[in-house]
Amino acid sequence: MARCKGMRIQTKPLLRIAPAALSLVALLGVAACDRAGNDPSADKNAASAAKAPAGFTFANAPGGGETEAADSLTLRAQVALDRLGFSPGVIDGKEGQSYRLALQGFQEARNLPQSGTLDEATKNALLAGQPSTATRRVVIPQDFAKGPFIPDLPRSEGEMARYPQLAYRSLTEALAERFHTTPDLLVQLNGKGTRIGAGETIRVPDIPDGARFKMDEDPNGWADTLQKLGVAGDQPEADHLVVDKSSGTLRAYAKDGKLLAQFPVTTGSGHDPLPLGNWTVKGESRNPKYQYNPDLFWDASSKDEKTMLPPGPNGPVGVVWIDLSKDHYGLHGTPEPQNIGRTESHGCVRLTNWDAARLAQMVKTGTKVVFQA
């Protein structure tokens, strides 16, 4: 279970450069730096990197519009739901619980029967105006491929403290988060031997680039984070949120009661139940540092000590902490998006990093939050 209690204000993270190109098999634990030295295609990789666009925009690759066998109707529906703000969690092409909940949320927002299935009326409403395929082929930009990446990043809080930031372990993991999917689906779409790096082409779920969010001050690189997660900075403003324990959803409503967005969440456990009641948003910490205090966790090791963890998407609270009026509780991201709705938390409400980032753009200090059974 990810630990989420005890937050402190963040500082700007440090960067570390990663190799230019690697294979998708890196997701199996092969570090990029272990492959770069004797690579017979090193010259080709260098040439690809030189041609890669700068920034974090994923340009369409030539021939990127054709449909692949993996472009199932379920995958296409998941992409459409994500683009419209009714998150299915990770896009994986499977008809799981999060997918059915996302369909129900969309159906409610469109005044359709809430069957949780892709019936004909729902399909027509959902796919209207959406791309005709679920995926596209893109060119990996230079700045995105730089990382930083930390292949040997540990999973225990005590060991994480010695790193400058809790970055992604590989480019594969970063690409999966950018396109709201899993490393497994990227392998399915491309094959294990596909090389990835600056200037390389890869097939991904069709989650578009968001226009860069303009901020007067951005000491923690939030605008970059939004782009790296494929999240637009401009989001509809939520009047109130409802976290439903029984369904495992967080719903954002407009002032007139219209359902604006829905996200799957993990809420509490038997030891740390969701604190039912009415709360408010006190503020946000973007790309936050994390104060780990083992005294707050029933399952902490007796050897654990208080420590400050650096920021990063693989930290215990991911890319953002939305602080609530209930002490030690908040809404936040996670380093394990595939586990949302499938594991427990220490009372807080966890979302995928991309859903948490989107939610952070929808709320402000004073936004009402209801936790219900």
Image: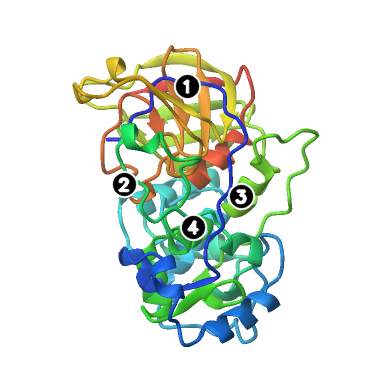
Q: Residues within 10 Å of mark 4 (few under 14, many from 20)?
A: many
Among the two numbered marks 3 and 2 on one chain, the one whose residue lies closer to the N terminus: 3
Observer-side mark, 4 or 3, equals 4
Q: Amino acid at mark 1?
A: Met
Among the two numbered marks 1 and 4 on one chain, the one whose residue lies closer to the N terminus: 1
The label shown at residue 231 is 3
Q: Are dots 3 and 1 in contact, CB under 8 Å?
A: no
Q: Amino acid at mark 2?
A: Asn
For the residue pair 297 and 48, the one nearer the viewer reads as 48
Among the two numbered marks 3 and 1 on one chain, the one whose residue lies closer to the N terminus: 1
The answer to whether residue 55 is above or below residue 242 is: below
Q: Which residue is mark 1?
A: 7
| Identity of the residue drawn at 71% across and 70% down | 53
Q: Amino acid at mark 4?
A: Ala
Q: Which residue is mark 4?
A: 174
Image location (x, y in percent) of residue 22: 46, 73
The kind of secondary structure element at disc 1 is loop
Q: Which residue is mark 2?
A: 339
Q: CA distance from mark 4 to mark 3?
A: 14 Å
Q: CA distance from mark 3 to mark 1?
A: 24 Å
